[in-house]
Image (cartoon, rainbow, N blue to C red):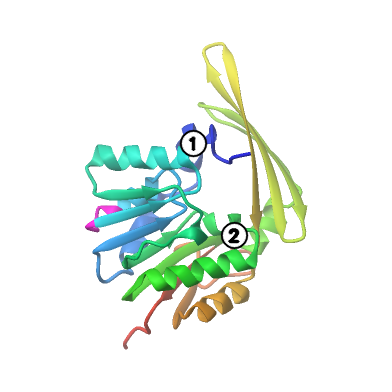
């Protein structure tokens, strides 16, 4: 079963109700010095990628879902931005190129269910960064996955769609069963999706980043300057290949 197959058509409608992409893009751009080549891992439909890509000469897009990637490529083509796109898992990248910035946003890394997969991503990101390159990513915190999502069910209604969301928690992993009902005249089209995300403790992620070679690692509360609290739902991590001066 391939996640996001039909979901790619309604993803932007859904996610933009909760995510301010402009603020995230500004946050990320403000932490990058050189802006030649940019790599986005788990780019989805490219809504965030395209805002960041405007500041770079070339952008590489990676997503496991061809359908999501098709949406992203369409946006980049319409905008006339130089890009290359690859339907790959994040731990499979091997471009023989170096990037000034690598990102992975909107909990893409939570979809990697094994620690060795995450470690491989960190290792490959480090190898793909320039000497002063930076890796900026976010993950849903264990608090969000275990306490907010947990075994809870949700029902949402908007002007554009109705959907139900059932969660099943097993230790550190939550399985999400979603049913979307998209109106077409007097009828509704049903789109069914299943997703799994794993919670990773911050000390585990930091340890894996250090193992990969990163020397400067910062942990924040959801694209802010604030340190995380116990109830923080999304962590932002900034990992630099080389220590900052000063």
Q: Nearer the viewer, mark 1 or mark 2?
A: 1
Q: Quadrant of residue 197?
A: bottom right
Residue 225 visible in the shown view: no
* Whole-percent x, y for residue 144 in the image: 64, 57
Q: Secondary structure at mark 1?
A: helix
Circle 1 sits on which residue?
8
Report which residue position mark 2 lands on.
Answer: 233
Q: Name the dominant secondary structure of the magenta segment.
A: loop
The N terminus: image quadrant: top right
Quadrant hosting residue 47: top left
Q: In this rendering, is residue 202 above or below 44? A: below
Q: Residues within 10 Å of mark 2 (few under 14, many from 20)?
A: some
Name the residue located 29 percent from the left edge and 49 percent from the top edge: 83
Q: Which residues are magenta?
A: 53-57
Q: Residue at x 59, y 18 (%)?
A: 188
**Relative to 131, does residue 140 appear above or below in the rendering?**
above
> What's the CA distance linking mark 1 and mark 2?
24 Å
């Amino acid at each position: 079963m391939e996640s996001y197959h039909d979901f790619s058509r309604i993803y932007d409608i859904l996610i933009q109700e909760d995510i301010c992409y402009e603020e995230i893009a500004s946050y990320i751009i403000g932490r990058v010095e050189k802006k030649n080549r940019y790599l986005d891992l788990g780019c989805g439909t490219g809504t965030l990628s395209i805002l960041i890509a405007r500041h770079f000469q070339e952008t590489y897009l990676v997503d496991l879902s061809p359908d999501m990637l098709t949406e992203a490529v369409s946006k980049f083509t319409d905008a006339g931005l130089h890009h290359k796109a690859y339907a790959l898992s994040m731990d499979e990248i091997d471009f023989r190129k170096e990037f000034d910035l690598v990102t992975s946003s909107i909990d893409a890394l939570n979809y990697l269910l094994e620690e060795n997969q995450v470690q491989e991503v960190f290792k490959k990101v480090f190898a793909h960064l320039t000497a002063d390159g930076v890796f900026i990513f976010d993950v849903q915190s264990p608090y969000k996955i275990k306490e907010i999502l947990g075994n809870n069910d949700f029902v949402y209604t908007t002007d554009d769609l109705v959907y139900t969301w059932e969660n099943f928690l097993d230790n550190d992993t939550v399985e999400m069963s979603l049913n979307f009902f998209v109106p077409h005249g007097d009828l509704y089209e049903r789109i069914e999706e299943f997703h799994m995300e794993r919670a990773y403790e911050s000390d585990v992620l930091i340890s894996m980043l250090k193992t990969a070679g990163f020397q400067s690692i910062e942990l924040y509360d959801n694209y802010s300057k604030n340190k995380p609290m116990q109830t923080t739902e999304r962590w932002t991590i900034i990992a630099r290949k080389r220590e900052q001066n000063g």
